[in-house]
Image (cartoon, rainbow, N blue to C red):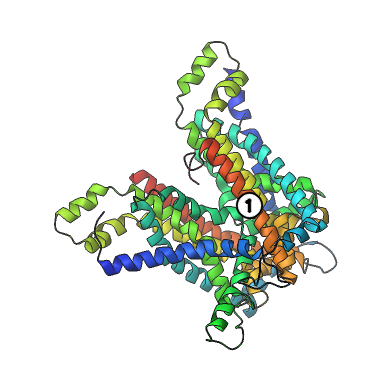
Amino acid sequence: MSARLSIRHAALLPAIAIVGATLVAPALLMLGYSFLRFVPGKITDFTLTFENYQRLFGDFFYLRVVLETVQIGVIVTVLSLLLGYPVAYFLARTKSRFKGLLTYLVFLPIMVGIVVRAYGWIVILGRGGLLNSSLLEMGLIDSPLRLLFTVYAVTFGLVEALLPFMIMPILSSLEKVDRHVEEAARALGATPLQTFWRVTFPLSLPGIVSGSLLVFSLSITAYALPALLGGAKVKMIAALAYEAMLVGYNWPFGSAIGIFMGVVSGTIVYLYIRSIGRRGSRA
Amino acid sequence: MTRMHPLLRWLGATVVISAYLLMLGPISVVIIESFSDSEVMRFPPTGLSLRWFHALAGNADFLSSFRVSLILATVASVISTAAGTLAAYALVRHRRARQASIESLLLAPLYVPRVLLGMALLLTLSKVSLAGSLLGMVLGHVLITMPFVVRTVTASLAGIDPAIEEAARSLGATWREMFLKVTVPMIRSGVIAGAVFAFIISFSDVYLALFIAGPATITLPLRIFNYMEWEQTPLIAAVSTVQIALILVVMIIAEKAVGLSGAGRL
């Protein structure tokens, strides 16, 4: 019995040690750093202070970046929902033999990685890119438009990158909808559209909520894609953190931005997990 | 199939097709552009050639980064598969107090933005002089890939009757014999799926490398990232195509071997 007891704990140990050493301890360290004073030339000065947070919330420049980030996050979430819902609905209902492949194709972009896809956007939006050459060819424009390094490039890039995270939860909630409920509504005289709006759509709300929270949380913390497609023109909050950490070597201020992002995304993720939990208990 | 109004069906079809174009467009143009024969990025390409693949084969920077990424993804996925499988087993087979908190702790890396993981790891690894080292990168990549293993293995363990394991034990097998000879073969598909996802996630991640890579540990995605900030020749398309091909091959082999789609969706 005691051998078995030790095994049940021992099997968990490596995983817990890894998460403890590379997530929990670093997060605490970051929290600590965020209260330290920054002295240029020195990595840290061990004086406790709130000035990193005061700077973040007191300076109009940083507030504007935060607002712009939230704005992009909201737009990306809404667009992903508008595009993603029909895809999820199609995948949940189709009887095509390509259903498996089509579901797979939704996953594929995540697997390929963000940097490769960002380059794809450059090929599409760049000076000599697909869009500019098509417009020039059609005679709609005389010289290439500047499409890259705009807020639109960042927005479309993020929608493309995050769409799978919207589609998957909606798909899984649509697949749980009992078809008999829809048939009952039809049998009772509801039109297909009424059936959708009053039966199917409300039943898929949990998926919509979790997909939206996930996409919003991922878009407001994005760094690589905005950096590549937005350049210096579109600054999102993660770029501030990156610059503080690796350009200015101001680790205390970078940590304060990080803690702020962590609190915001942590709250969103908490709501997300609760929305999944409720869905689970209902089933 | 409930019949929708034709106009609605048409609208729906348009949105679905646009969404697929949006998701697959960037990858497709990268693959086409990699066969371009022109000096600068131009799409559609004026002619086709393999010159950029030749250029890639002679590019020491990209080759060394490819090696770094391959080593990193292999080592990280082996470690996270081992630790993640054991942890999933312990979680599923031995319900305990604080079960839910341990589970959320192990899945937490999925939900913490990668930027934050990168920053926090930079602070920590610098404290122990591991910033920039391969060991530091491996630790970070084990962290971000382990949750995928925990999930896929948990999913496949759920379908296995503990009585089979108990039978092995009562026939005199030690715990280790039972685990390696009875349990692991039964959850094989979950373990392999987890390992494949771990490999792919590690191979394609750029976030951690942005913060904790050193001059000798620049991964392939980070190298592409750095190049892209300065120039945008089809060389990047060629190296991206190699990355896409590698990931596709890994996924197809795994799909043929165990059926990733059946082994627990992510």
In this rendering, is residue A25 above or below A190?
Answer: above
Residue located at (69% from left, 45% from top):
B73
Location of mark 1 (residue): B245
Q: Nearer the viewer, residue B155 or B27?
A: B27
Q: Nearer the viewer, residue A53 or B226?
A: B226
Residue located at (22% from left, 61% from top):
A192
Among the 4 quarters of the image, the one containing residue A126: bottom right
Task: Give the image location of residue B123, x and y in percent.
Answer: 74, 55
Residue located at (67% from left, 59% from top):
B240
Q: Nearer the viewer, residue A91 or A219?
A: A91
Secondary structure of residue under mark 1: helix
| Left or right: A100 in relation to A241 | left
Residue located at (67% from left, 54% from top):
B242
Q: Residue furthest left?
A: A188
In this rendering, is residue A194 above or below A278?
Answer: below
Look at the image and tell me in which quarter the N terminus of chain A lies.
Answer: top right
Q: Chain of mark 1?
A: B
Label 1: few (<14), some (14–19) or many (≥20) C-alpha neighbours in 10 Å: some
Q: Amino acid at mark 1?
A: Ala
Task: Give the image location of residue B160, x and y in percent.
Answer: 46, 27
| Left or right: B5 in relation to A111 | left
